[in-house]
Amino acid sequence: MRPREAHRLYGAGRPTAAEIRGWIGWRLDDVNGSGLGRLEGLIPDQGDVPADWLAVNEFRFGRGRRFFVPAGEAVGSGGRVWVPYERARVLGSTGRGAAHHTPQAERRLQEYWAGTVRRAA
């Protein structure tokens, strides 16, 4: 009998920009399945380059608050997108991004999410 070989298991890859564009308008849920808002877009949107951030509009009539969530670990299916972050952490990102993504907004988001974001290899 041959000994079994150990194999390293890998998770799903980072979602592509095209995949995320298909999620726009879908409900975004936190790690516990609580709804946070609707996926509004991806930032920056540079063709097929994977997005760094998901822009989320809070559930409200009119224009709600806008949150920014790292895109790398988001998973979408059946009209819902799930992110592995707690509600309070996501809500804390309000005001750190900008309508027009700037280097300053990028730095604020990176500082806020530091330590929680798994970077692509």
Image (cartoon, rainbow, N blue to C red):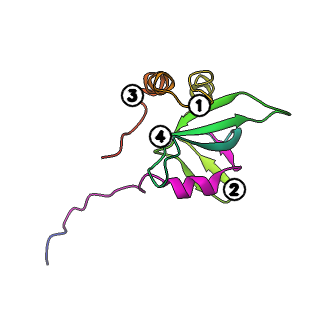
Q: Which mark is residue 79?
A: 2
For badge 1, the amino acid type reads: His
Task: Report, in whole angstroms, how far the alpha carbon at label 1 lies from the one at label 4.
Answer: 14 Å
Query: Counting other residues with Cα less than 10 Å from the Cα at mark 3, is it few (<14), some (14-19), or many (20 or more)?
Result: few
Task: Return the residue nearer the eye: 11 or 111.
Answer: 111
Q: Earlier in the sequence, mark 3 or mark 4?
A: 4
Residue in the image at 66% along x and 50% along y: 24
Q: Name the residue under label 1.
A: 100
Residue 7 as seen in the image, left or right of residue 103 = left
Identified by mark 3, the residue type is Gly
Magenta stretch, residue numbers: 5-31
Q: Residue furthest bottom?
A: 1
Disc 4 from disc 2: Cα separation? 21 Å
Mark toward the start of the polypeptide (3 vs 1): 1
Residue 69 among those drawn in magenta: no
Front-most of residues 8 and 2: 8
